[in-house]
Image: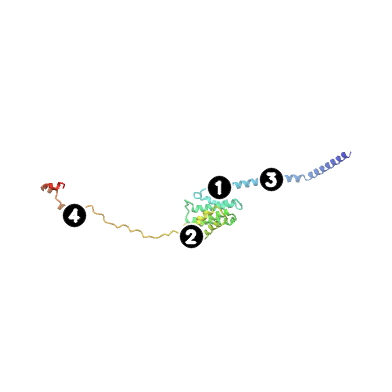
C-alpha cells in the first residue's frame, strides 16, 4: 500500500510539473518561435559570410599567382594590378605583405629586367618605388630572420641599381650595412650570396673611366703610280727603238762559234 501510494504521489507531481511547463510554453510561444527563427537566420548568415570570405580569399590567391607568373616586361600593366591587389588586401595579415612585396618585385624587374624599354627617369621612379616598399616591409617584419634577410637583399639590389643610374641616389655605405646585417644575423640561406655581393661591391659599382683619345690621323694621300708613260717619254721611246721595218733591213748577227775548251769538263 505504501509503495502504491508513493507512486501515485510522484505521478501526480510529474503531471502537475508538465502542466505548468506547458502553460509557460504556451504563454511564451511567440517569443520562442521568434528566437528559433533568429538563431537559424544567424547560422545561415554566418555560413554565407564564411563562404564569401573563403571565395574572396581563394580569388585573391589566384590573382596573386596569375600576376606573379606573368612577364612584367611584356605586360607592364601587371604592376598596376599588383598595387590594386595590395590595396584590396589591406589589413590581411597573410596576403597583404605578399602583395606588397610582389608589387616591389615587379617595379624592380620592370626597371632593370632584360629587355626593358623604359627611359632613365621612369626606371629611377620604379626603383625608388620598389625601394620604398621594401623598407616598409622590412620595418614590419624585422623580427622574422628569413623574411628580413630576403627584404634586405632586395633592398640592396634596388640601391645598387639606383647607384648605377645616378650615384647621388644611393649610398654605398648603406648598401654595405644591409649586406653586413644579413651576415651578422641568424643563419639563413641568404648569407653566402650576401658575402659574395659584399666582396664584389666596390668592383661592381666602380664608375667606368672614359679616356678621351685623339682620333687617328687619316693615311697620307699618295699619288697613284702612272701606268701610262707621259707623252714626251713615249715620243723618246718611239725615236730610240727601231721599228720592225728597220730591224728587218739590218743583217742578222752571225752566230759565234762555241769554244770546245769551255764546254769540256775539267
Residue lying at the far front of the rendered structure: 266
Name the mark on residue 167.
2
Q: Secondary structure at mark 3?
A: helix
Disc 3 crowd rating (10 Å Cα; few below 14, some 14-19, many 20+) is few
Residue 26 location (% of width, % of height): 79, 43
Q: CA distance from mark 1 to mark 3?
A: 33 Å
Q: Which mark is residue 233?
A: 4
Residue found at x 55% / y 47%: 65
Residue located at (60% from left, 47% from top): 57
Left or right for 30, reference 161: right
- The answer for how far apart the CA atoms under marks 2 and 1 are is 35 Å
Q: Of helix, strand and loop, which one carries label 1? A: helix
Q: Is residue 139 above or below residue 15?
A: below
- Tell me if residue 54 can be seen: yes
Residue at 75% over, 45% down: 32
Q: Which residue is mark 3?
A: 43
Label 3 or label 4, whichever comes before in sequence order: 3
Amino acid at each position: 500500500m505504501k509503495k502504491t501510494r508513493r507512486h501515485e504521489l510522484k505521478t501526480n507531481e510529474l503531471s502537475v510539473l508538465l502542466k505548468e511547463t506547458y502553460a509557460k510554453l504556451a504563454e511564451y510561444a511567440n517569443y520562442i518561435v521568434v528566437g528559433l527563427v533568429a538563431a537559424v537566420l544567424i547560422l545561415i548568415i554566418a555560413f554565407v559570410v564564411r563562404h564569401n570570405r573563403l571565395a574572396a580569399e581563394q580569388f585573391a590567391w589566384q590573382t596573386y599567382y596569375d600576376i606573379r607568373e606573368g612577364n612584367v616586361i611584356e605586360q607592364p600593366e601587371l604592376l598596376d594590378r599588383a598595387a590594386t591587389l595590395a590595396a584590396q588586401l589591406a589589413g590581411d595579415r597573410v596576403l597583404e605583405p605578399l602583395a606588397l612585396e610582389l608589387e616591389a618585385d615587379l617595379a624592380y624587374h620592370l626597371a632593370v629586367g632584360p629587355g626593358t624599354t623604359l627611359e632613365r627617369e621612369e626606371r629611377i621612379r620604379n626603383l625608388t618605388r620598389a625601394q620604398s616598399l621594401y623598407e616598409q616591409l622590412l620595418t614590419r617584419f624585422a623580427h622574422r630572420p628569413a623574411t628580413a634577410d630576403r627584404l634586405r637583399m632586395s633592398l640592396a639590389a634596388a640601391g645598387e641599381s639606383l647607384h648605377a643610374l645616378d650615384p647621388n641616389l644611393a649610398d654605398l655605405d648603406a648598401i654595405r650595412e644591409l649586406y653586413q646585417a644579413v651576415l651578422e644575423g641568424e643563419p639563413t640561406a641568404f648569407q653566402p650570396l650576401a658575402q659574395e655581393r659584399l666582396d664584389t661591391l666596390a668592383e661592381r659599382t666602380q664608375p667606368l673611366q672614359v679616356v678621351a683619345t685623339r682620333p687617328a690621323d687619316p693615311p697620307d694621300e699618295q699619288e697613284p703610280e702612272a701606268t701610262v708613260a707621259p707623252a714626251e717619254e713615249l715620243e723618246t721611246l718611239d725615236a730610240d727603238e727601231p721599228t720592225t721595218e728597220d730591224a728587218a733591213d739590218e743583217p742578222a748577227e752571225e752566230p759565234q762559234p762555241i769554244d770546245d775548251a769551255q764546254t769540256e769538263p775539267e
